[in-house]
Image: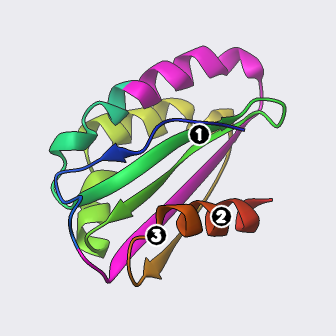
Amino acid sequence: MLRSRWIAGPDAEQRGPLVAALTDFRMDRMLDLPGIARRGLSLGRLWPSLPGAVGMWLWADLPGRRVGSLSVWRGESDLREFVRLRAHVEIMRDYRHRGTLRSRTWQVGELDRAGLWHAATASSA
């Protein structure tokens, strides 16, 4: 599995409780990977300016045809604002029908990046 560096958001120093969100998109065809990756990285560049964003990783499991993100938010309302962002809505509209999306959110007491990554990958295996 490939993983980006941790990308800190403007609320990187926020103490818990926090909200973690895992997205896991399994592409039907690897031919869609370049477009998905380009759009995902473009959205990732917005990260440092997103209100309520604590931090995130982008990840890819190429043999499994899966890509996604693991993000941490100050709260549920901040996550919902991100989901409604125009750039995010456009990506979802353009690629939703090209694979299967799974996502989940959960509460995090304090930010433990190693523990968070382990919990997310253990649950998605």
Q: Which numbered marker is on residue 112?
A: 3
Answer left or right for 74 relative to 116.
Answer: left
Indicate the secondary structure of the residue bearing disc 2: helix
Q: Earlier in the sequence, mark 3 or mark 2?
A: 3
- Identify the secondary structure beneath mark 1: strand
Which label sits in the foreground, 1 or 3? Answer: 3
Residue 2 percent coordinates (x, y): 66, 34
Q: 102 left or right of 72?
A: right
Please determine whether, in this image, residue 105 is positioned above or below residue 7: below
Q: CA distance from mark 1 to mark 2?
A: 13 Å
Q: Amino acid at mark 3?
A: Asp
Residue 102 within the segment the image draws in magenta: no
Q: Residue at image x 47%, y 40%?
A: 92
Quadrant in which residue 26 is drawn = top right
The residue indicated by pointer 2 is 118
- Residue 118 lies in what quarter of the image? bottom right
Q: Earlier in the sequence, mark 1 or mark 2?
A: 1
Towards the viewer: 48 or 86: 48
Q: Amino acid at mark 1?
A: Trp
- Which residue corresponds to the image point at 42% horizontal and 45% vertical from the top-left? 6
Q: How many residues crowd around disc 1 within 10 Å: few (fewer than 14), some, or many (20 or more)?
A: some
Residue position marked by numbered label 1 in the rendering: 59
Q: Which mark is residue 71?
A: none
Which span of residues is magenta-colored? 15-41
Q: Is residue 21 magenta?
A: yes
Label 3 SS:
loop
Q: Amino acid at mark 2?
A: His
Residue 40, percent across and down?
A: 45, 31
| Residue at screen point 20% across, 61% down | 52
Label 1 to label 3: alpha-carbon separation: 18 Å
> What is the quadrant of the C terminus in the image?
bottom right
Q: CA distance from mark 3 to mark 2?
A: 10 Å
